[in-house]
Amino acid sequence: MMLTRLLVILVTFAGIAGCGSTRTLSSDNVARVDDLQLKGTGCGDTLPRVYGGVVYNLCVMSGDSHPRGGPLYAIAPMNVPMAFLDMGVSAVADTLTLPYTLYRQNQDGDIQLLRD
C-alpha cells in the first residue's frame, strides 16, 4: 500500500514536470522552440493558449523520428510516447484554466515560436 502511494506520487510529479499545460501556461507571448522542447517537431509558428497543453503534446508527437520531449519521451516497456499519456492530464489542466487562457488568448493571441 505504501509502495503504491509512493508510485502514484512519483508519477504525478513526473507528469507535472513535463506537462504540456505547464509549459504553455508559463510561456510569454514569444517563446523559443528550444525552450519548449519543440525542436524537430511538426509544429507551425504558433501555439494557441486555449488547450495549449493538448496542442503542445500533439506537436511533441509529430515531426521527424529523433527522440523528442526529453529523456522520458517513451516509456520503455510499452514504448508509448509520454506526451500521449500526458495529453489526458493536460486536457484536465487546460479545462480548469480555461477562463484564464481564454482571457490571455483574447488579449495576447497565440504564443509565437522563435526558431533558430
Image (cartoon, helix red, strand yellow):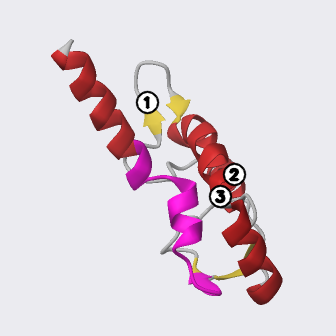
Q: CA distance from mark 1 to mark 3?
A: 19 Å
Report if residue 17 lies within the magenta region: yes
Relative to the observer, which residue lies in front, 37 or 116?
37
Relative to the observer, which residue lies in front, 65 or 100?
100
Q: Secondary structure at mark 1?
A: strand
Question: Residue 12, can we see it?
Answer: yes
Establish if 67 lies above or below 109: above
Tag in front: 2 or 1: 2
Establish if 102 lies above or below 2: below
Marked residue nearer the N-terminal end (1 or 3): 3
Q: Label 1: how many residues lie within 10 Å, few (<14), some (14-19) or many (20+)?
A: few
Q: Amino acid at mark 1?
A: Ile
Question: Residue 116, can we see it?
Answer: no
Q: Label 3: how many residues lie within 10 Å, few (<14), some (14-19) or many (20+)?
A: many
Q: CA distance from mark 3 to mark 2?
A: 15 Å
Marked residue nearer the N-terminal end (3 or 2): 3
Q: Amino acid at mark 3?
A: Tyr
Q: Secondary structure at mark 3?
A: helix
Residue occupied by mark 2: 95
Residue occupied by mark 1: 75
Tag in front: 3 or 2: 2
Q: CA distance from mark 2 to mark 1?
A: 26 Å
Identity of the residue drawn at 79% across and 83% down: 109
Q: Amino acid at mark 2?
A: Thr
Tag in front: 1 or 3: 3
Corner quadrant of residue 44: bottom right
* Residue 37 coordinates in the image, percent (x, y): 51, 65
Relative to the observer, which residue lies in front, 36 or 79?
36
Q: Quadrant of the N terminus?
A: top left
Which portion, as a residue range, is magenta? 15-31
